[in-house]
Image (cartoon, rainbow, N blue to C red):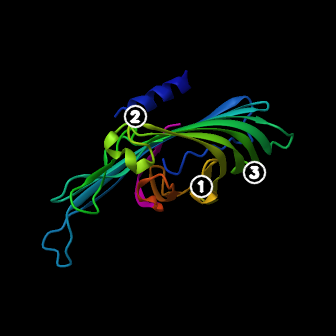
Amino acid sequence: MKHFFILLLFIGVAVQSTAQETIIIPDTLDNEWAVNWIVGLNGSQSTYNNWAAGGQNNIAATFFSKVNGAYRKGKFTYGYVFNVRYGITNIDGEDSRKTDDRLATKHRAAYILNNENTMNAFAEITFVTQFYDGYDYSSGPRDLISDFMAPGYFTQSIGYAYTPKDYVSFEAGLGLKQTIVNDDTIIPGYGVDTGNNLLSEGGLKTGISFSKEILPNVNYTSRFETFNNLKKAIVSTDVSWANEITGKINEYLSASFQFEMVYDDDVIANELQTKQILAAGLLVNLR
């Protein structure tokens, strides 16, 4: 019942993490759930009055919520992640602009294949999109480049994973990927043919996950993934690498650094995408 409540609460927030949607099943679990839920708010504010060096008044805030669940019974394991993030900034004299926007979930079921618990066969489903409109401000009037389910990504995969330690995992398998763009005006930017809102691909999927406390109260999480469409050349492989370092200052305050790189030649301009966010603020562990 408590897990159903968490799911409902997530949906309630959604109709309004990163590192990433990384699932790690602790070795210590035995026929029980391990659930962790954090919420946080990062913010900054600057005001200038007759400041000789110059500057514009501004305020920025980012809300985030992340739920991780893990279950193990005998050789069977199941894990899930729900990740919600939204950030906005307002600069004096300009329109408000979003600085972060993510709605994502991942679910994985696996069966352990050996007595050392290092090899498993898995099936996984993921979903990623954003909440609100996103714009390109680089030239002239702003251009709409994203919206809710524009794009939205569904992936399904099956394969094998090698987990030598409970904080690191290597995996490979077969995958299906669906790109959904429900706004016809931005379809060309995501490799979807005009008149069609869906691009389906099948291919080979690999991944490396890492999540560990590297220093007291400092955790590093990393997720590296590739997806190679079997109908495309190897140079068209989709690649993503997401990293997050979080540090706990005290019971309620934390700081984090995110760095992400994505390459997908179906996406706008066929260029490497990068994102970097340094933040500090309130963090509450609800579970």
Q: Is residue 129 left or right of residue 223?
A: left
User: In which quadrant of the rendered view does residue 139 lie?
Assistant: bottom left
From mark 3 to mark 2, how far is it between C-alphas?
33 Å
Residue matched to label 3: 165
Q: Nearer the viewer, residue 112 or 254?
A: 112
Q: Magenta span has 284?
A: yes
Which numbered mark, 3 or 1, is in the foreground of this view?
Answer: 1
Q: Find the distance from the CA under tag 2 to the CA under tag 1.
A: 31 Å
The residue positioned 25% from the left and 56% from the top of the image is: 59
**Residue 181 pos. (x, y %):** 40, 40
- Give the class, few, some or many, for how many residues have Cα within 10 Å of label 3's Cα (few <14, many ≥20): few
| Residue marked by disc 2 | 14
Q: Residue at x 43, y 43 (%)?
A: 193
Number of numbered callouts drawn: 3
Q: What's the distance in space between the residues labelled 3 and 1, CA to CA?
A: 28 Å
Residue 145 appears at what percent x and percent y? 34, 50
Q: Tell us which disc is closer to us: 2 or 1.
A: 1
Image position of 30 with respect to 269: above or below: above
Circles 3 and 1, Cβ within 8 Å, touching? The answer is: no
Which sits earlier in the primary sequence, circle 2 or circle 1? 2
Q: Position of residue 91 (x, y in %)?
A: 22, 59
- Type of amino acid under label 1: Thr
Residue 283 - label? none
Which amino acid type is marked by label 2?
Ala
* Residue identifier under label 1: 237
Which residues are the magenta region? 274-287
State left or right for residue 187 relative to residue 112.
left
**Depth check, front residue: 214 or 103:** 103
Assign a secondary structure to mark 3.
Answer: strand
- Tell me the quadrant of the picture where the N terminus can be found: top right
Evaluate if marks 3 and 2 touch, with contact meaning CB atoms under 8 Å apart: no
